[in-house]
Image (spheres, coloured by chain):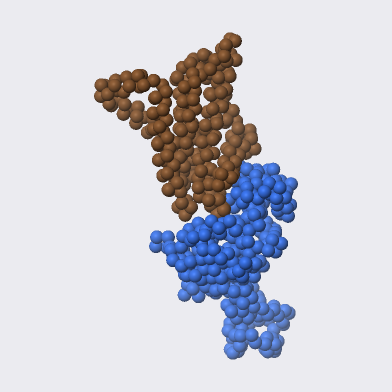
Amino acid sequence: MSDIAIRTEDLTRNFSSLCAVDGLSLEVPAGTIFGFLGPNGAGKTTTIRLLLGLLEPTRGRAEVLGLDTRTQAEAIRERTGALLEHHGLYERLSAEDNLEFYGRIWHLPAGERRTRIQDLLTHLGLWERRKETVGSWSRGMKQKLAVARALLPRPQLIFLDEPTAGLDPVAAASLREDLAALATREGVTVFLTTHNLAEAEKLCGQVAVIRQGKLLAVGHPDQLRSKGSAPKVEIVGRGFNEETLARLRSRPEVAEADLRNGHLQIELRGDTDVAPLVRLLVNAGVQVEEVHKGKASLEEVFLTLMKEEKE
Amino acid sequence: MIGDIWTIMWKEWKEWLFRWGGLRKEGGLLGVLIFVGVFGVFMPLQMGRAWVDSPVALSYFVWLPFFVVSTVIADSFAGERERHTLETLLASRLPDRAILLGKVGAAVGYSWGLTMMSMILGLISVNLVHGHGTLLLYPATAAWGSAALSLLVSILAANAGVLVSLRSHTVKQAQQLLSLGFLLLVFVPLFGAKALPREWTGKLLAAVATAGPTKVLLVAGALLLGLDLAFLVTVLARFKRSRLLLD
């Protein structure tokens, strides 16, 4: 198998005057959980539809598992699983029948089908409730079942379109844990779209940021954090005043210094030493209790990218 | 391909018959029992021996599939679209034709199966109550003719239903369009025939009378078969995955 699971070149899709995906060139390494981040309407769902061959590109091309989406879409769908925007479960049928149906679609032999369904449902804690109609289930349980359905035929690649959207924090965390465990166990490549940046940070080995169909950045979350925004320092203490803030701002290594909720937030220019700044504060009479130095969160990088693109 | 078609049919029947767990709530199975009870027990017992002898009774079995199909076929694509299950199905490995033929096959099997079940049960009911020791049977030509025409009508209605369902956003919209189509199919020939000059209708009726039931059934069958094929070709040509995602 190639090292690249997905490759797109200038992939573009227009709907009348709207350009949903605009010249997207991307490579997704095999065996990773790849996060595709963007706000609502950024073109994430359209990209998945293009990669599955459900839509034809207006321009450009895409290869999934080495297969062309225009000419080999059926072969792509044979090797992939998907949890799309909606869970797509048959709510009048039982959980077991939903999986049975998709197991038959993928021509899993009866014995293997039964074993696989039991294995996945047991792993997700749904085996005892397999006979219940899905319509009576909570959203979190439905999403878990939809993940099981996507993994049922042991695909090489799965597309997950905002799998935790609309779930309460407990259900979302539980699904995230199951997803990570299953992806590792099955050795599957995961293409995950989300606008939940904490989720991407926890799950993804690589992320790409998209806005209005255009790719803004791609890389490991750490790389993006170091590229996208300067290091920050948060200082907890007492005795901050305008004079000390002004003195801090006049230092060459300080890009910005502000008080937020009583905490001093300093944005540095480059990876500089914090000790001189702490000394300055102590000398000015500030009682320093805690100092935290760190890189910007993925969320801050994301917001910076969105802001830059708007400007 | 056959296996894939069968898989779709299995899922459709399971949804129609055992929705919400059998007889509870909507109860697809309950609907089947009511239908078979009315057309396989109640009406035959009301009509008595005439249920077997009269061509009017057998003509029920020709038009019944229209109504049975219209209750389920709108659900095929419009229903899946409305319940957001269509895109996941389209993202599966199933070939286009397997999805399409599976949906048509399920509707045809369901409506024709119900009709035949009612026809057989009707015969049993009449024999049990009105037979008085003699075996009553449908006239052979009428029985085979009804069964064949019923199948062809089922196929026609299913294809028309799929065609409408392909582009409808909701089941309600699909059902409204289908009902309108079926009304036109019934009333246009009815009023059209009345608009014909008397001389022509007289000649037509005379021709039907002299041709005999076998020829009439064959002509009707050939016409329906032609229509079935025309609809099937249209449906196959119009079924494109990318066109089915309307949102």
Picture quarter containing residue A244? bottom right
* B206 to B233, vertically: above or below: above
* A253 to A146, vertically: above or below: below
Tell me residue A195's x, y (percent): 58, 64
Tell me residue A76's x, y (percent): 56, 59
Picture quarter containing residue A289? bottom right
Residue in the image at 40% along x and 32% along y: B222
Tell me residue B162's x, y (percent): 47, 42
Rendered shade, chain A: blue
Q: How many marks?
A: 0
Which of the image's four quarters has the N terminus of chain A? bottom right
Q: Is residue A78 toward the left or the right of residue A171 in the image?
A: left
Residue in the image at 32% along x and 19% along y: B206
The brown-tinted chain is B
Q: Is residue A213 toward the left or the right of residue A152 in the image?
A: left
Please state which of residues B247 and A2 is positioned toward the viewer in this rendering.
Answer: A2
Picture quarter containing residue B3? top right
Answer whether residue A232 is visible to the viewer in this image.
yes
Residue in the image at 48% along x and 34% along y: B154
* B195 to A133, vertically: above or below: above
Answer whether residue B172 is visible to the viewer in this image.
no
Residue in the image at 52% along x and 37% along y: B107
Tell me residue A248's x, y (percent): 62, 86
The single residue placed furthest to the top in the displayed view is B132
Please state which of residues A266 and A18 is positioned toward the viewer in this rendering.
Answer: A18
